[in-house]
Amino acid sequence: MPAQKLEFAARAGDPTTVKTDCLIVPVFQNGALPPAAAAVDAASGGTIEALRKARDFTAKAGTTLLLHRPQGLAATRLLLLGAGNADPESQEGVKLLAAAARAAFATPARNAVLVAADLLANQQPERFARLAARLFAAAAYHYRDAENGRDSHQLGRLQLLSTERTQTRALNQGLTLGQAIGAGVNSARLLGDLPGNICTPNHLAEHARGLGRQYPKLKVQVLDEQRLRRLKMGALLSVTAGSEQPGCLITLEYRGAARQAPVVLVGKGVTFDSGGISLKPGAKMDEMKYDMCGAASALGVMEAVAAAELPISVVAVIPAVENLPSGKATKPGDVVTSMSGKTIEILNTDAEGRLILCDALTYAARYKPEVVIDIATLTGACVVALGKQASGLFCNDDRLAEGLLDAGITAGDRAWRLPLWKEYDEQLKSNFADMANIGGPEAGSITAACFLARFATDYRWAHLDIAGTAWNSGAQKGASGRPVPLLMEYLLAHCEGRR
């Protein structure tokens, strides 16, 4: 678990007299300063307006400027936060709050106060606070610290300051929920960032068991390979055949609503993907430790749901395997039989995620779900199509698709819907089995989703391809924790009966 746990609180008060190590004041780009920022500007002798007029601070969304010992204020530091002209619940709003968090953590401040009053005009206080707490909690994450149970920064407390006492309760409720979501995001990031020799299928199972011990409402079960053979999960077992690390199927059940059909999350858990016999190129193969980020996000969501005690029933089904070449590994041209009884010709062993997911999707039907959402780092084709900005969304139900797209916009964790047309499905034809596991070089992300759709015909189903969004490469290499925010916003809307 990540080491640092921030404290959050909300209160009403005058920003000019609040004592804090760091006072964060949003400043809009154009027009007159709104009331809270104007009060700070007046108390500090017109500092903010002078900076805007001189263009030393443009107030573009996400920009920051730190001033030490500002005159006329009780705060030790004044952090000006460029708010542009953004709605705090839009993508620009996510950007500015994330920037505030980064800038605050870069200071030696032990506590900070975010003046929320001007951003709350025409906004829902609970939702704004939820977003702020999530982003500040996520900003506290650092892999080396999380792995070793320590923290390297000073900031331990954030307060949201409003001028309306009537907003305090809603703000505190939002902070509590946002903190839980942020913790789930950080847990998903830590699991993703762990090296493959530590984060094995068994490690994922132990992590799930740990959540079960921490949260009494979570029921955890781990099915080993012997039980998977009895269930006739031939597709899943074909992937794990080449590894000395045994595979497993992990389930977590949270029953927060009596007699309610659950939302089932199916998370791809390939803890390392070499490609198997269809070996991947060596460049960037180290990043294939992230091929379990679907499983990590499902676990992060279950942690957040349990911590927040949401009034909803959610189940996570996580097939966990390692994909390696050996004398026992599945070969191109082999035919395997899935749990559903459908046969699959393996044309490429690097298209393994869909093989473990198809058995997990069949297994998910036993929960009589309201909806099933699978989350998987499934295809490089999705990265080519959408880059790092949006997760690919495929769905057999328009209402479910709309709910997930709306949730992504609210969370600043967006998805984009792609088609599941019959013409694409025909690319999966095989002369030797019911289907092939790849559909050729064209529309790879779509044919992969069409493959999964064949095993999700008995319920409302969505597939999130997070190959482009689950982690960052280069100098900022690391897991992102996406799409935990999207999924949590969807579940929250579900709790309110909106989806």
Image (tube, rainbow, N blue to C red):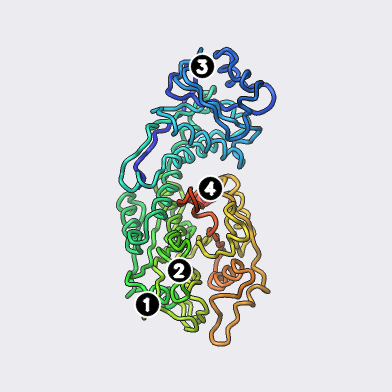
SS at badge 2: helix
Q: Name the mark nearer the viewer: 3 or 1.
A: 1
Give the alpha-carbon distance from disc 4 to disc 1, as whole Å.
42 Å
Give the alpha-carbon distance from disc 2 to disc 4, as whole Å.
24 Å
- The crowd level at tag 4 (other Cα within 10 Å; few <14, some 14-19, many 20+) is many
- Residue found 42% across the figure and 65% down from its top: 270
SS at badge 3: loop
In this image, 311 relative to 201: left or right?
right
The three-letter amino acid code for the residue at tag 2 is Ala
The one nearer the camera, 460 or 226, is 226
SS at badge 1: loop
Q: Which mark is residue 489?
A: 4
Give the mark, 2 or 3, whose residue is nearer the N terminus.
Answer: 3
Residues at circles 2 and 4 in contact by the CB criterion of under 8 Å: no
Give the mark, 4 or 3, whose residue is nearer the N terminus.
Answer: 3
Q: Position of residue 198 (x, y in %)?
A: 33, 59
The three-letter amino acid code for the residue at tag 4 is Glu
* 82 lies above or below 40: below
**Residue under pointer 1:** 326
Residues at circles 4 and 3 in contact by the CB criterion of under 8 Å: no
Give the mark, 2 or 4, whose residue is nearer the N terminus.
Answer: 2
Q: Position of residue 85 (x, y in %)?
A: 66, 32
Give the alpha-carbon distance from disc 1 to disc 2, as whole Å.
24 Å
Give the mark, 3 or 1, whose residue is nearer the N terminus.
Answer: 3
